[in-house]
Image (tube, rainbow, N blue to C red):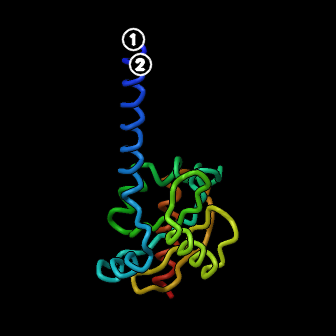
Amino acid sequence: MYMRKILLTGLLALLMLSIGVRVEAAEWETDLVQAVKTAKASGKYVLVDFTGSDWCPWCMKLEEEVFSQPEFKKYAAKNLICVLVDFPQDKYQSDEQKAWNKLLAKKYGVTGYPTIIMFSPNGGFVLKSGYQYGGAENYVNYLKEAIAGYKGK
């Protein structure tokens, strides 16, 4: 009886964790084509994160220090359409998604992870970078400066 209770508690915890992960991931699009259409209609910029979400230490650090933080989420909700282009080792991904992600990485010259690319609402190239030190507030300022520099051209 005691073992059954422990097992049920563990299964419930795993279920809650998996639901939490799915909710978090739902904030990021996986369809860049649709994201570009949405950005054009909304006037938002497109932020594309090429990541190895379950194996790349710098990718996980960027997620933990920046993308999961309230400062970034607040800024992103108002200004960005975020797209996740993931290259996981252990997470399930359809063959179609894998092929699409490889095509995108080749198209944009991605050779390491994380690589962040940002486009304007009209599809213009704004920036290509990697991990930035300083946490969410610094990262948001970095994006704001890139947008200001782009608008100034």
Q: Nearer the viewer, residue 92 or 57?
A: 92
Q: Is residue 41 left or right of residue 32?
A: left
Q: Residue at x 47, y 70 (%)?
A: 47
Residue 80, horizontal then vertical, whole percent: 39, 69
**Which residue position is annotated with label 1?**
2
What residue is disc 2 on?
Answer: 6
Q: Does residue 150 sit above or below 90 in this rendering?
A: below
In the figure, 15 relative to 35: above or below? above
Contact between labelled residues 1 and 2, with CB atoms less than 8 Å apart:
yes
Which residue is more in the foreground, 153 or 90?
90
Count of residue discs: 2
Q: In the rendered image, which quarter contains the N terminus?
A: top left
SS state under label 1: helix
SS category of the residue bearing label 2? helix
Q: Position of residue 91 (x, y in %)?
A: 53, 53
Q: Residue at x 36, y 69 (%)?
A: 79
Q: Position of residue 18 (x, y in %)?
A: 41, 43
At label 1, counting other C-alpha atoms closer than 10 Å, the crowd grade (few under 14, some 14-19, many 20 or more) is few
- Between the residue at mark 2 and the residue at mark 1, the CA separation in whole angstroms equals 6 Å
Q: Is residue 70 above or below residue 28?
A: above
Residue placed farthest to the right in the image? 111
Mark 2 belongs to which amino acid? Ile
- Relative to 140, 38 lies left or right: left
Of 15 and 24, nearer the camera is: 15
x, y percentage for residue 123?
45, 85
- The amino acid beneath tag 1 is Tyr
